[in-house]
Image (cartoon, rainbow, N blue to C red):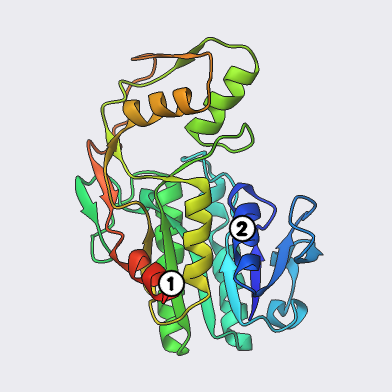
């Protein structure tokens, strides 16, 4: 298959492209720049939102994996609301032109304050602009795909652990601070429990999910297990031999942060099981 990956140059995109290539499928990497993407992919630089017929422009891909997004880690950026129409227009153009499978990256921030295991039927009540925008894009994509008989996959991300200084997660920021020689890192109480996946596993799960069509709809890209934030971050410090300590309580816990929230990973585990057969 030919899989169009938008936002391929981003933190998530680079690893996901690598994993899709390992499956033997062709990747068309799209973004303003794609200089950090594997040379094994087809590179097309430019503003995808300005293309009149992206399905034609990107060579009639079999699958759209839409990762492109601005300010994903700035939860209340005005860009989230302002850019909804760009994303929905792009997805609509792809579906109207004939693509048969659309996968879009989602976020656990769509859920809002919730305690327990999140599945595809869990009601959403987003409490920041990021969650509101993603929830709106999900509902739009689901409806347009259904009306056109297109396979829709919403890949709901939870927390990703990455041992580099180049991402925007707390783990990347911690790694970067240690590289700068800082010995203290401002932190919350760390008592909340979240769902964590290592970056490589996350990328592999996404790649395998979009290279099949049997399992669709909302798919949690998650471990399925809650883990205390403080314990996961302390483990990260030890595993990466970082000379830095957490300054607990320097930041207050956010009002929309649940005490314990994790993803039901039944679907992704079934996909992985089918892939191994």
Q: Is residue 50 above or below residue 57?
A: above
Q: Is residue 99 above or below residue 73?
A: below
Residue found at the very far left of the displayed protein: 116
Q: Nearer the viewer, mark 2 or mark 1?
A: 1
Q: Name the one closer to the observer, 137 or 39.
A: 39
The quadrant where residue 236 appears: top left
For marks 2 and 1, the one nearer the N-term is 2
Q: Is residue 188 left or right of residue 34?
A: left
Secondary structure, mark 1, is helix
Could you classify mark 1 by the number of other residues whose Cα lies within 10 Å: few (under 14), some (14-19), or many (20 or more)? few
Residue 112 position in % (x across, y down): 30, 47
Residue found at the very far front of the displayed protein: 277
The quadrant where residue 252 appears: top left
Q: Please state, as top left, top right, bottom left or bottom right, where the C terminus lies in the image.
A: bottom left
Residue drawn 48% across and 85% down?
150
Q: Is residue 275 left or right of residue 218?
A: right
Residue drawn 37% across and 70% down?
273
Q: Name the one closer to the observer, 135 or 197.
A: 197
- The answer to whether the residue labelled 2 contacts the one labelled 1, judged by CB atoms less than 8 Å apart, is no
In the rendering, which numbered label is found on residue 276? Answer: 1
Total labels drawn = 2
Residue 66 position in % (x across, y down): 58, 65
Residue drawn 57% across and 44% down?
71
CA separation, marks 2 and 1? 29 Å
Q: Please state, as top left, top right, bottom left or bottom right, where the N terminus lies in the image.
A: bottom right
In the rendering, which numbered label is found on residue 142? Answer: none
Secondary structure, mark 2, is loop
In the rendering, which numbered label is found on residue 68? Answer: 2
Q: Is residue 204 above or below residue 108?
A: below
Residue 220 position in % (x across, y down): 36, 60
Residue drawn 45% across and 48% down?
130
Could you classify mark 2 by the number of other residues whose Cα lies within 10 Å: few (under 14), some (14-19), or many (20 or more)? many
């Amino acid at each position: 298959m030919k899989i169009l990956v938008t936002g391929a140059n981003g933190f998530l995109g680079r690893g996901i492209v690598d994993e899709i290539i390992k499956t033997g499928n062709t990747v068309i990497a799209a973004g303003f720049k794609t200089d950090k993407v594997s040379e094994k992919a087809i590179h097309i630089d430019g503003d995808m939102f300005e293309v009149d017929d992206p399905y034609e422009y990107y060579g009639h891909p079999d699958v759209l994996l839409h990762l492109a997004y601005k300010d994903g880690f700035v939860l209340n950026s005005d860009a989230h609301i302002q850019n909804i129409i760009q994303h929905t227009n792009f997805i609509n153009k792809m579906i109207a032109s004939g693509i048969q499978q659309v996968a879009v990256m989602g976020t656990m921030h769509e859920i809002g304050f919730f305690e327990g295991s999140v599945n595809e039927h869990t009601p959403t009540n987003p409490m920041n602009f990021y969650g509101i925008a993603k929830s709106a894009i999900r509902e739009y994509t689901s409806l347009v795909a259904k009306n056109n008989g297109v396979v829709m996959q919403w890949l709901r991300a939870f927390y990703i652990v990455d041992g580099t200084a180049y991402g925007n997660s707390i783990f990347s920021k911690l790694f970067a601070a240690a590289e700068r020689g800082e010995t203290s890192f401002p932190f919350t109480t760390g008592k909340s429990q979240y769902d964590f996946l290592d970056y490589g596993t996350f990328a592999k799960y996404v790649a395998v999910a979009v290279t099949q069509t049997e399992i669709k709809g909302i798919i949690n890209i998650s471990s399925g297990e809650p883990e205390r934030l403080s314990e996961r971050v302390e483990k990260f410090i030890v595993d990466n031999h970082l000379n830095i300590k957490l300054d607990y309580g320097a930041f207050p816990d956010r009002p929309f942060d649940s005490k314990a929230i994790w993803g039901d990973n039944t679907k992704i585990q079934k996909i992985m099981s089918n892939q191994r057969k």
